[in-house]
Image (cartoon, rainbow, N blue to C red):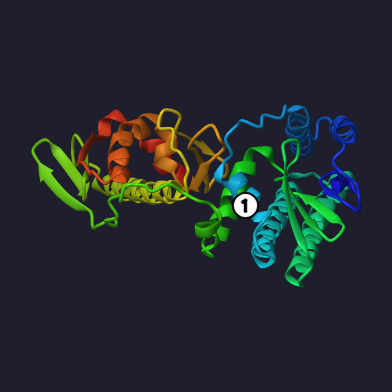
Amino acid sequence: MPDDNLQTRGSKTLHCGSVSREFTSLARNHTGKVPLARWASAVLLALLALCTQPLNAAAPHSLFERTVLALQDAPENTRREFASIALSQLAEAYRNEAELVQRDISKSKKLQRWSREVASYGNELLFFRDSVVSGMPVKLILQPLSGTIIEVADQQTILTHPRPKQQSALESQILKQFCTTGFCDTLVAAPEVPIPDRSPQGNTRWQFTAGGAICSNRSIQLVFANAAELSRQRKICDDLFSEVYLLRKELHWQQEHGVTIDWDILKVHPVSPEQHLLTLNRSGDHVVAELHLLQANPALLTSLIPWLRNQLAGTPRSITLQADQFDFEDAVLAQN
């Protein structure tokens, strides 16, 4: 099965040479069949990067990695909860990948077979999860070469997304779901942080002047040069305030769990049509959320950073943004 390199059995471990040969052969044999060749090449490059990555014991760990390390000495039921969530999320990722490949492929029997095998691996992961739920002992291993390994009895699975660019999103989703159980509060020690402004997103207020239209929500104002396209402006304001207050909430959550926010490197990347990844620091911490406007307008995020920093520091300040300085049109159209 092509995914044997991702799920090890018995005493088997990740073998970088076999991974390289397997995926190189796969990509070569399917030259011209873009979806599969691109998928295989991306997985190969990611795995080879893991194989050649030097160990840096001094490198700071992300919140996800710190959680895995803490879980190694945690009660069995806590490890079992984490493993169950992680395997469910990983299985969903593989089954979604199989559906995506199935939609994109031609009538090639080889490609159809590959899609079925990817889906089959997703189902195997669900059976693996059921073993965890049934009470089998769980061990979590953090390896610099292969990432997080979930071991149940004599079987191991590497927690690797089929699309390397979505690995951080997978880890963030697993962590967020696991932390809603309350386990993170006792597992990962976090320093005391200032009490942030917790005021929720309020109702949007509008003002119409000779100079144009102004929408505001608590301490944020967006000024339009005219009021000729009010319906579009309402959409922009609603989306902007929704994204900004969601981002403030997510950053506060990260801060509460000891994540250092490097304001100089904040950047939003698209990972799917509905999801975006905000890089928080060089340790590998991220926020996963729908941030269409912020992704389409890097300058908008830069303009909001002082406001966000003050909000998290508990010293809120107001901010006024000029709509004509940003490109909202593409982001609005992308959501329709």
Q: Nearer the viewer, residue 48 or 242?
A: 48
- Residue 283: x %, y % from top left: 56, 35
Residue at image point 75% right, 56% down: 139
Q: Nearer the viewer, residue 24 or 312?
A: 312
Amino acid at pointer 1: Ala
- Residue 91: x %, y % from top left: 72, 57
Residue at image point 70% right, 54% down: 90
Residue lying farthest to the front in this orientation: 73
- Let me know if residue 116 appears in the view: no
Picture quadrant of residue 178: bottom right
In the rendered image of this protein, does residue 238 appear above or below residue 84?
A: above
- Residue 28: x %, y % from top left: 87, 29
Residue lying farthest to the left in this orientation: 210
- Residue 11: x %, y % from top left: 91, 49
Q: Position of 63 compared to 56: left or right?
A: left
Tally the numbered discs: 1
In the rendered image of this protein, does residue 211 appear above or below residue 128?
A: above
Q: Position of 249 compared to 112: left or right?
A: left
Q: Nearer the viewer, residue 20 or 271?
A: 20
Residue at image point 51% right, 62% down: 180
Q: Nearer the viewer, residue 272 or 318?
A: 318
- Let me know if residue 137 appears in the view: yes
Q: Position of 143 compared to 236: left or right?
A: right
Q: Residues within 10 Å of mark 1 (few under 14, many from 20)?
A: some
- Mark 1 falls on what kind of element? helix
Q: Position of 200 compared to 123: left or right?
A: left
Residue that mark 1 sits on: 70
